[in-house]
Amino acid sequence: MVQSKAEDVDGYLAEVPDERREVLTRLRELCRTELKGFTEVMAYGMPGYERDGTIEISFASQKQYISFYLVRSDVREAFEQRLEGQDMGKGCLRFRRPEKVDFDLVRDLLTAIAAGPGKIC
């Protein structure tokens, strides 16, 4: 998917391919449930969740995968063992197939992020 021009997350989800919409909607629901006190925004063409004006989590439907942007380096370090073996860039966890999204891992990452502010990479 090319960078979205959607003004809100509902519009973003309406644009994504059908085979990814359910998974992306579930990611959104997890973010909204776990990230109390965060604001849902569209930034850089994808859904993001910010606290005190700083985006700490984003997700997107990319051409070849679903990406989950984990920009908190302290949380990445704390979850180093669980993230080992995952398809991961500097701050991006990639799921090449929608059915392979590890929602338990995502929930645990979100819980750790919600616990308090930390270092943004």
Image (tube, grey):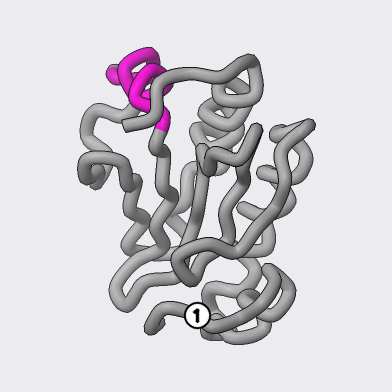
Q: Amino acid at mark 1?
A: Ser
Quadrant in which the C terminus appears: top left
Question: Could you say which quadrant of the image residue 95 lies in?
Answer: bottom left
Q: Residue at x 22, y 40 (%)?
A: 90
Stretch of the chain drawn in magenta: 72-80
Q: Is residue 42 above or below residue 107?
A: below
Quadrant in which the N terminus appears: bottom left
The residue under label 1 is 4
Q: Could you tell me residue 50's position as x and y percent?
A: 61, 42
Q: Could you tell me residue 118's position as x and y percent?
A: 48, 18
Q: Residue at x 67, y 63 (%)?
A: 25
Q: Is residue 65 above or below residue 3?
A: above
- In the drawing, does residue 94 fall left or right of residue 55? left
Question: Could you say which quadrant of the image residue 6 lies in?
Answer: bottom right
Q: Closest to the observer: 34 or 50?
A: 50
Q: Secondary structure at mark 1?
A: loop
Task: Confirm whether the magenta stretch covers residue 36.
Answer: no
Furthest residue in direction front, as rendered? 53
- In the drawing, does residue 121 fall left or right of residue 104? left
Q: Residue at x 45, y 70 (%)?
A: 61
- In the drawing, does residue 119 fall left or right of residue 58? left
Task: Confirm whether the magenta stretch covers residue 78.
Answer: yes
